[in-house]
Image: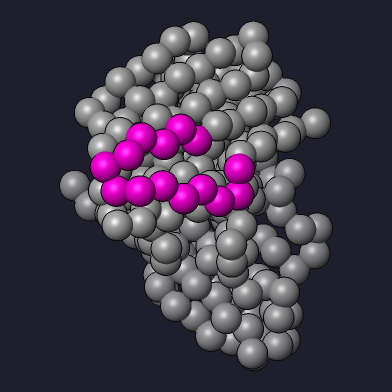
Amino acid sequence: NAGVMQNPRHLVRRRGQEARLRCSPMKGHSHVYWYRQLPEEGLKFMVYLQKENIIDESGMPKERFSAEFPKEGPSILRIQQVVRGDSAAYFCASSPPRGDSYNEQFFGPGTRLTVL
Amino acid sequence: GQNIDQPTEMTATEGAIVQINCTYQTSGFNGLFWYQQHAGEAPTFLSYNVLDGLEEKGRFSSFLSRSKGYSYLLLKELQMKDSASYLCAVINYGQNFVFGPGTRLSVLP
């Protein structure tokens, strides 16, 4: 059973370009979370998605950032017109359908975005 | 509001015991997690507490006091490989994880 997969692992973009980050959750997991981590800082929640639904996007910047989790395929975090301040590690986590017990989040290896 | 506090950095010696504290104020409480994160890598699960008390798992233990909004992670018999960041995270009523800033632990020989 493969873990959470993210690609690319490293992404370099010039200011003004678009960045597309992909996340494939663990098999059987229907919940996906995206986090951003700046150097020397903790994880900041961005968005929580289920298949075809955005459940909570309270941590997403209002402009340039969007996320989706289609019925088929990976979840995508899209950053339009990137700026230097977008340089960070972006982690995806997945969890199984919520039941009575806690749902641990399993993290992917992250995508390190560098904006030149 | 949501606020989780941890010390920024700690240093300890190989073989020693270290306690990493975490205090939280969140919109509701549905459990507290500790994660370990080595530099450049993904966080990995260490422990989960939802009831008051101590949970022991090998060299690592985690304690929770819900009335005080307080938890600690206890690492015994420290090894060099324990040098990492330790993240405290609380599940709030929205069922979302709120992460603290992390504590960077350096284990010295």
Residue B54 appears in view? yes
The reply, left or right, for residue A1 in relation to residue B23 is left
Image height check: is B21 above or below A86? above
Residue B9 point in image, percent of width and height:
55, 51
Looking at the rendering, which quadrant does residue A10 occupy? Answer: bottom left
Q: Quadrant of the C terminus of chain B?
A: bottom left
Q: Nearer the viewer, residue A40 or A8?
A: A40
Farthest-out residue, left: A1
Residue at 19% x, 47% y is A1
Residue A40 image-quadrant placement: bottom right
Q: Quadrant of the N terminus of chain B?
A: top right
Is residue B8 located in the magenta-colored stretch of the structure? yes
Snapshot quadrant of residue B27: top right
Nearer the observer, B68 or A48: B68
Residue plotted at (35% across, 48% down): B13
**Magenta segment range?**
B7-20
From the viewer's perspective, is residue A16 above or below residue A20? Answer: below
Q: Is residue B49 above or below residue B36?
A: above
Residue A97: where, in percent of width, then height?
Answer: 41, 29
Residue A55 drawn in magenta: no
Q: Give the side of residue A28 with respect to residue A116, left or right.
A: left
Where residue B58 appears, as percent x and y from the top left, is 22, 28
Residue B2 lies, in percent from the top left, at 74, 33
Q: Residue at x 50, y 52 (%)?
A: B104
